[in-house]
Image (cartoon, rainbow, N blue to C red):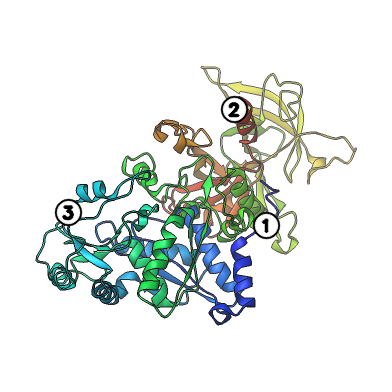
Amino acid sequence: MKNDATPAPNFIKNIVIDDIKTKKNDAQVRTRFPPEPNGYLHIGHAKSICLNFGIAAEFGGSCNLRFDDSNPVKEDIEYVESIKEDVHWLGFEWARLHHASDYFEQLYDYAIELIKQGKAYIESLSAEQIRTYRGTLKEPGKESPYRNRSVEENLDLFQRMRAGEFPDGSHVLRAKIDMASPNLNMRDPIIYRIRHASHHQTGDQWCIYPMYDYTHCLSDAIEGITHSLCTLEFEDHRPLYDWIVDELNTACHPQQIEFARLELEYTVMSKRKLQQLVEQGLVQGWDDPRMLSISGLRRRGYTPGSIRDFSDRIGVTKKDSVIQMSVLENSIREDLNHRATRVLAVLNPLRVVIENYPQDQVEEIEAINHPNRPELGTRKLPFSRELYIERDDFMEAPPKKFFRLALGREVRLRYAYYITCTQVIKDEQGKIVELKCRYDPATKGGSSPDGRKVKGTLHWVSAAQAIDAEIHLYDRLFKIPNPGAEGDFIQHLNPDSLKILNHGKLEPGLGSADVNTYYQFERQGYFCLDSKDSRQDALVFNRTVTLRDSWAKIEKAHAHRRR
C-alpha cells in the first residue's frame, strides 16, 4: 500500500468527471446511501457514506439517505434511528430521506407491468425445488413447469398473493429472463415473496414484499439517481439491475458502479459475525469500543474527521485489498494530536512523599494545555508534599537504559521540580507501597540553575487533590490479522482487548470532563470520557489509541512467520 499520508486515487471520481464533461444526465450528480436497517453501521459503511456524500458534495450534486427496508422480519426502527444518528455524526446531511417502503405501491405496479409484458410469472415450486431447477455454475438451469402460465393466471395469482390468500412460501413472483444464462442471477430471479409480517413503516398493509435486487434498482430510478455506487459483490448483479430498468423503460437509468469493500486487519466486517459477538455476550453491545461499529468508534473517542480522513487515505479501487489497522489508528492520532488537551493522569499509582517539602503547603504549578497551540492557554496544577507517580516509572534495580526513577537517582517532575529517591517502603508481602524522596527547590519549572541535566521526566498528580477514575485500556479485538479467514473466528479473540484499571488518579480539572472533549494523558495515550458508563461520582475514561503504534513489532513478527 502507498504511504498512508497521501490520499489514494478514486476511479469513481474520474467517471463522474467524464460524465459531467459529456453532459451525461445533464451534467447532474445524484447519489444515495442505501443501508438496510437490520443492524448498526460499521467502519465499512462509513467508507460508503463518505464516498456517496463526498462525491455529491464535490460536484455540486445531492445525496439521499434511503433505507432499503423490504425485509420486515430483520428490520427495526431502532436501526433506522441509529443509522440517521451515525450519518449526521460523520458530518453529512442528506438531500432527501426515503424508504424503499415509500415505493411499495409503485413497485407493485411495476411488477404488474412485467407480468402483462410476459416477463414475470408466479412460481409455485418449493424453495428447494427452485434451487434445484436453477442449475449450477457449470450446468444450465431448467425451466419451471409454471413458467408458461398465462398472463391472466399470473395476474390473478399475484393479486391474490397481495390479498393474503396464500401462506408464506407457497408462491413467489419470478422475472422471466434466461434459465441457461451463465450468470446465475439472470436465471429467472425471484422478485416478490409472501411474508406475513408487520413492517416498521407500513404496518400490516402488505403481506408480499419485493426482493432487494428488484427494489434497489427501481428505487434508484424513481429517485433519479445518476451514479449508483455499491461494493464488488454486486458486480454480477449489474446485468439484472440493467435488465429491470430497461424492461420497465424507467425515466431515469442509473449507472451502477462497483468498488472494493473495506477489509481491515484484526477485525471482522461481516454484519453476521458482528451480530454473533453481540448475541454471545463476547462484547458489551454494538457500541462496545472494541467493535468497529460507528457507535463503538464514537464511544471510544474517534472523531468524525478522523474517519473521513481514513476514508480518503484508503481511496476507492476495483481491487480487493486488506488495509492495515495502523492506517485507521494514524488518522485518529493525527487528528487528536492537533485537538486533544494535554493533561496529567496516573493509571497505576505509586505514592511519593517529598520529605523536605513543607507539610501543609500546596502551590500552583503552571501547565500548558497544548504544546503547539498557544491559543489554548495554560492551567494551574496543585503541587504538594504527597504525590502519585506511575508505578512503572520506578525500578529498584533498573537496567542500563532505564532513565526513570530509581533509588538514589534524580528525575524531573513535569512542570515542577527535580526529585531524588532516598528510600523505598514495602508492605509485608514485599510490594513497594511508597517512595521517600527529596526535592530541589531551585529547580522549579523543571530546570536547574547550576545546569545539571536529568534524563527522565515523569508525570504526576497531587495526592490530596487527585480525582479517582476507572480507566479502560482498549486494544484490537483479535489476535491475528485475518480472523475471519482462519477457522472459527471466535477462537482468535484477543483476551487482552480490554484491561480495566480501577485506581486511576487524575489531575483535579478532569472532574468536570466533558464527553465531547478529547484528552491526551501525557505519556499514556489519547483518552475520552465514556459516554455510557461514566457518572459524575464514578468517572470512566476510555483509551482511544496509544501514542505510538504498539502493534508494529507484532505485525512484523507475523509477516516474518508467514515468509
Q: Residue furthest left?
A: 165
Disc 2 versus disc 3: distance between alpha carbons? 49 Å
Q: Which of 117 and 289 is in front in this view?
A: 117
Where is residue 299 shown, x and y percent of the image? 47, 53
Is 197 placed above or below 494 here? below
Select label 2 or label 1 by which is in front: 2
Residue at x 65% of width, y 43% of height: 547
Task: Using residue 413 as the reference point, say whether residue 61 is left or right of it.
Answer: left
Are dots 2 and 1 in contact, CB under 8 Å? no
Name which residue type carries label 2. Answer: Arg
Determine the image quadrant of residue 347: top right
Q: Is 279 located above or below residue 399 in the figure?
A: below
- Can you say which quadrant of the picture contains the N terminus? top right
In this rendering, position of residue 213 left or right of residue 16? left
How much space separates mark 2 and mark 1, taking CA atoms? Answer: 29 Å
Lower position in the chain sequence, tag 2 or tag 3: 3
Location of residue 70 in the rendering, given as x and y in whole percent from the top left corner: 29, 64
Q: How crowded is mark 2: few (under 14 residues within 10 Å), some or many (20 or more)?
A: few
How many labels, in total?
A: 3
What's under tag 3, amino acid-wise? Leu
Q: At numbered mark 2, what does the secondary structure look like: helix, strand or loop?
A: helix
Q: Is residue 348 left or right of residue 79?
A: right
Per the image, the residue denoted by label 1 is 7
User: Can you tell which mark lies on residue 480?
Assistant: none
* x then y, percent, for residue 195: 19, 60
Give the SS element for disc 3. Answer: loop
Using the image, tell me which numbered label, if any, was put on residue 562: 2
For the C terminus, the quadrant is: top right
Q: Which numbered tag is attached to residue 125?
A: 3
Q: Which of marks 2 and 3 is in front?
A: 3
* Residue neighbourhood size for the residue with mark 1, other residues' Cα within 10 Å, grouped as few (<14), some (14–19), many (≥20): some
